Amino acid sequence: MIHKILIANRGEIAVRIIRACRDLHIKNVAIFTEPDRECLHVKIADEAYRIGTDAIRGYLDGKRIVEIAKACGADAIHPGYGFLSENYEFAKECEDAGIIFIGPKSDIIRKMGNKNIARYLMSKNGIPVVPGTEKLNNNTLEEIKNYAERIGYPVILKASGGGGGRGIRVVYKEEELENAFESCKREALSFFNDDEVFMEKYIENPRHIEFQILGDNYGNIIHLCERDCSIQRRHQKVIEIAPCPSISESLRKTIGVTAVAAAKAVGYTNAGTIEFLLDDYNRFYFMEMNTRIQVEHPITEEVTGIDLVVRQIRIASGAILDLQQSDIHPRGYAIEVRITAENVWKDFVPNPGKISEYFPALGPGVRVDSHIYKGYNVPPFYDSLLAKLIVKATSYDQVVNKLERALKEFIINDVRTTIPFLIAITKIKEFRRGYFDTSFIETHMQELLEKTEDHHQENKEEVIAAIAAALKKIRESR
């Protein structure tokens, strides 16, 4: 049994894990850097320890985190998402120190964290992958051009150790290739300390479908159905839906079986996600595996009734997965929107500041996962996520109506947020019908901005014209 968990994270996900610990009567420990001293996860934890003055560095100091866990008597560490959650070296440090890492084994994280290795393993085990290459760093520019010619433009360059929309460049013609390759390498080195890059065929305007996986330490693996993550901006997810409103039951079963086979191919344990791209002909391709809990996990919890964080902790404790695939029957639909501190009218630039009023939406079928409160000072150092609004209803049409209602009730003052932009999305007919792909926001950007209410009275017409011109330039460059 696990008796005390140190949470190697901050903000919303740290609060979520603390609540799961309390549900299981497990002691919890928070860590924080100085700018996070007033964050909610620090205030509500059983214990909290400062890990430095630098905003980011402390959350990335695996050795120090393990030292704190040992000193305070924590027998497990939950990494949440981001930071060290998919760092196999950190997982190995926990294992070597005799501390339970709440996630898969370090070797699995190592294999699946490198997109190029993951592609090879999936292809070897019969999982469909997008046509592509191995790493290109040792190839000449001429060889890279030849690969792109064989694969066929457009192609996409990806950082092997990437994630979160970073280390990605789409190339539509040969003359763009050299600059894109060098730029991709630089960003990969900056964000992931690894400049390894590979190439894939770019599937234009696919649907992004991911399957939630649970596996215990005894070979039992199931999926908890899918989430549609196609509503994205610059490869960053904005809205997620469970289940996908636009695929058939037979396709759902086919991809689900494939997702479980992918997890079994690497002996996966704990919670994870298998991500696929789905084209216009319903052909699907493995994209990547996330070896951690996902930001969007609440919508799966809402439609299945299964607490994924509690399950993570139980599996890490050695419990047998007491669920079979036949037990999983999602009911209704759930949608999650990410409310961020960003200025929509200035190209979504982060907008930190002090929150003067905070009234989250309430009512039947409404859930809010957040770490903010009235008087909280949103720091400029972290991801701009303020809250996740999750709504549930019996039909897709009803859940979209509920989302619109809840967003209109949600109040965060004196910090600009994306709430008005999200309300505008609920008014677009393709979204209301459930038929959209990853190009949705780019395609509808001008219409979305026209529907977005600007409570700060900026010159909206000038901004719309500027963005329309930028979109026209993008289209012409293709």
Image: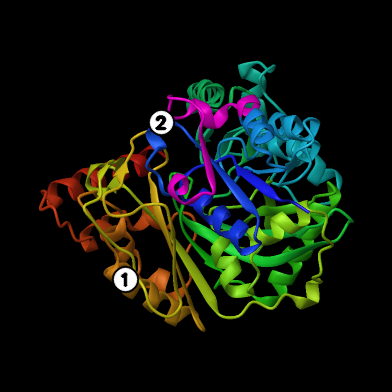
Residue 246 is drawn in which quadrant? bottom right
Residue 279 shows up from this direction: no
Q: Is residue 461 above or below residue 95?
A: below
Amino acid type at circle 2 is: Glu
Question: In this image, 24 relative to 29: left or right?
Answer: right
- The residue nearer to you, when weighing 151 against 415, is 415
Task: Classify 10 Å Cα crowding around label 2: few (below 14), some (14-19), many (20 and above).
Answer: some
Question: Residue 313: x, y in percent?
Answer: 71, 55
Question: In this image, 15 relative to 138: left or right?
Answer: left
Question: Residue 167: x, y in percent?
Answer: 53, 32
Residue 414 shows up from this direction: yes
Q: Is residue 132 above or below residue 310?
A: above
Question: Residue 44: x, y in percent?
Answer: 47, 52
At horizontal 32% and vertical 67% (from top left) the residue drawn is 407
The single residue placed furthest to the right in the displayed view is 218
Q: Secondary structure at mark 1?
A: loop
Task: Classify 10 Å Cα crowding around label 1: few (below 14), some (14-19), many (20 and above).
Answer: some
Of the image marks 2 and 1, the number of the one nearer the N terminus: 2
Q: Give the foreground label among 2 and 1.
A: 2
Q: Secondary structure at mark 2?
A: helix
Residue 113 falls within the magenta-colored stretch = no
* Region of the chain picked out in magenta, as a range: 41-64
The residue that mark 2 highlights is: 34
Residue 202 is drawn in which quadrant? top right
At horizontal 10% and vertical 49% (from top left) the residue drawn is 459
The residue that mark 1 highlights is: 427
Question: Residue 476: x, y in percent?
Answer: 35, 41
